[in-house]
Image (cartoon, grey):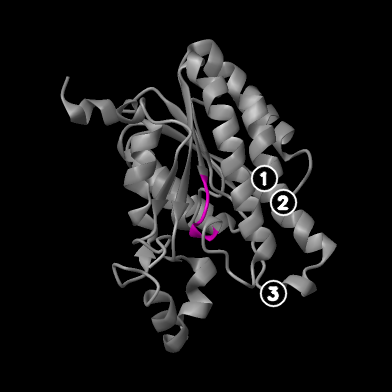
Amino acid sequence: MQIKNLFNLKGKTALVTGGSQGIGKAISMALAEYGANVVVNFRSGKALAEETWKEITAMGVECHLLQCDLTEVNSAKDITEYLVKNKIEVDILVLNASVQFRKAWNEVTPEEFELQINTNLRASLFLIQQLYPAMQKKQWGRIVTIGSVQQVRPHQQMIAYAASKVAQVSMVKSLAPQFAPSGVTINNLAPGAISTGRNEEVLKDEQYKKNVEAKIPVGFIGESSDCAPAALLLCSDAGRYITGQDIYVDGGMGLNF
């Protein structure tokens, strides 16, 4: 078999949380390009979601827009109800949505802590609980959590965010050997400094940008599209022998240099 055929996702359906913009959109587009139907979860910004829908359907695959706030405790059940109602079976789960607040550790409020943990960790676990059984039945599935270089280089003003990403990696490593006999892989993809809407404001400060780039061996801020090829590998048959891994797409930022 030609290697390129291992990336073929025709007939598969992917659910990408936070899939309407930034890294989530880049991954949604890559999966669609290789034949997957995509369910794009988004919390707000309907216009952006609709634009993503247009771009994905232009590739000749199906795209569903699923608006759901993952900070809500029952979000996983709400998403599952939508999938059942629309007769959608998910083969690929990309857990990209996250919340972060920039402030000193001793200024983090209980509400801010809860919002970050609910979205970045709790929603991931409960979505996996809901969607893994169907993957197990098919004896095929791909789960990718989107982490952060902050797992090894925590930002001093994002203590809860960084901690949630470390916890997510622990979850991945715990689940990987349990899922492997069912043909289901689970991995964590950890981006570094990426130029997204979330970082747009701080990166306008040229000095701040230079300070960040000085910590990156390749010397520049990455784009959302830089994360998509690695995600495609982990979501396809090309990555069938990779599970329980924490893979960095960070220009070397996570290295201790």
Along the viewing direction, whichever of 87 and 123 lies nearer the viewer: 123
Instruction: Tell me where the magenta segment starts and ends, as one range.
Output: 146-150
- Above or below, 171 against 106 in this view is above
Write the residue at 33% across / 37% down: 233
Disc marking residue 103: 3
Kindly check if marks 2 and 3 are in contact, taking CB atoms under 8 A apart as contact: no
Q: Residue at x 73, y 48 (%)?
A: 118
Dot 3 amino acid type: Lys
Mark 1 closeness class: few <14, some 14–19, many ≥20 residues within 10 Å? many
Q: CA distance from mark 1 to mark 2?
A: 5 Å
Give the crowd class for mark 3: few <14, some 14-19, many >=20 residues within 10 Å: some
Q: Is residue 211 above or below residue 219?
A: below
- For marks 3 and 1, the one nearer the N-term is 3
195 drawn magenta: no
How far across and how far down the image is residue 212, in percent?
A: 43, 76
Identified by mark 1, the residue type is Leu
Confirm whether residue 44 shows in the render: no
- The residue that disc 1 covers is 121
Residue 59, image x, y percentages: 32, 40
Nearer to us in this view, 58 or 12? 12
Which residue in the structure is indicated by mark 2? Answer: 117
Instruction: Looking at the image, tell me whether mark 2 or mark 3 is earlier in sequence order.
Output: 3
Image side of residue 250 versus residue 208, left or right: left
Q: Residue at x 54, y 15 (%)?
A: 136
Give, as a three-letter code, the residue at label 2: Ile
